[in-house]
Image: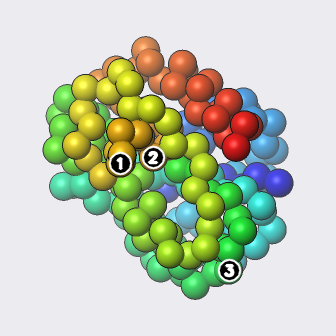
Amino acid sequence: MIGIFYGSSSGNTATLAKTIASKLGVAPENVFDVGRSSADMVAGYDTILLGSSTWGFGELQDDWYAFVEKLKLENLAGKRVALFGCGDSDSYPDTFCDAVGILHDELEGSGCEFVGAMAADGYSVTGSRAFAGGKVLGLIADDSDPNKTEGRMTAWIETLKNS
């Protein structure tokens, strides 16, 4: 069972989370705003999708700070975790979608299994924390290149289904 948890200030990440849910057949009651949820809710899911936009100088969306600290205390061993986020590569090339990398780094020692990394092909920025080893750590929606989001989402969803 899939649970989707997101933080969104402007609504872009919320919209992306709901679109992902629709494409994966995840019911709306399994999509959660981390600002209105508790971390122990992840216990009921085998696969957890975590989404955040990036703010300031490469920071998590505000609601994530308290949530991720509590999430690290949960038993994530054996859970599959996939990451997604929104950013703007033209305006913030040095910190583009760093929030995805921050979530990855924060949960790296939790025992979860990260899924959904893809080749970084087609991105003009690959120096942010959202990229590692020639791959992007999850689905990245680039506000500077919105025409590629649908194709990237389709490829990411296929990656999730095949992992």
What residue is shown at x 35% (from left), y 39% (from top)? 134
Could you tell me which secondary element the residue under label 2 belongs to? loop
Could you tell me which secondary element the residue under label 1 belongs to? strand
Sooner in the amino-acid sequence: mark 2 or mark 1? 1
Sooner in the amino-acid sequence: mark 1 or mark 3? 3
Residue 8: percent from left, percent from top: 46, 51
Badge 2 local density, few (<14 within 10 Å), some, or many (20+)?
many
Residue 126: percent from left, percent from top: 27, 37
- Where residue 135 sits, quadrant-wise, is top left
Quarter of the image containing the N terminus?
Answer: bottom right
What residue is shown at x 39% (from left), y 32% (from top)? 120
Residue 146: percent from left, percent from top: 40, 21
Q: Is residue 63 left or right of residue 36?
A: left
What residue is shown at x 58% (from left), y 84% (from top)? 73
Q: Which mark is residue 137?
A: 2
Q: CA distance from mark 1 to mark 3?
A: 25 Å
Query: As shown in the figure, which amino acid type bears the numbered disc 2?
Result: Leu
Q: Is residue 57 visible?
A: yes
Q: CA distance from mark 2 to mark 1?
A: 7 Å
Q: Is residue 94 left or right of residue 96?
A: left
Is 97 placed above or below 89 here? below
Q: Nearer the viewer, residue 56 or 74?
A: 74
Q: Which of the two marks, 1 or 3, is nearer to us in this view?
A: 1
Q: Which residue is mark 1?
A: 132
Q: Which residue is mark 3?
A: 75
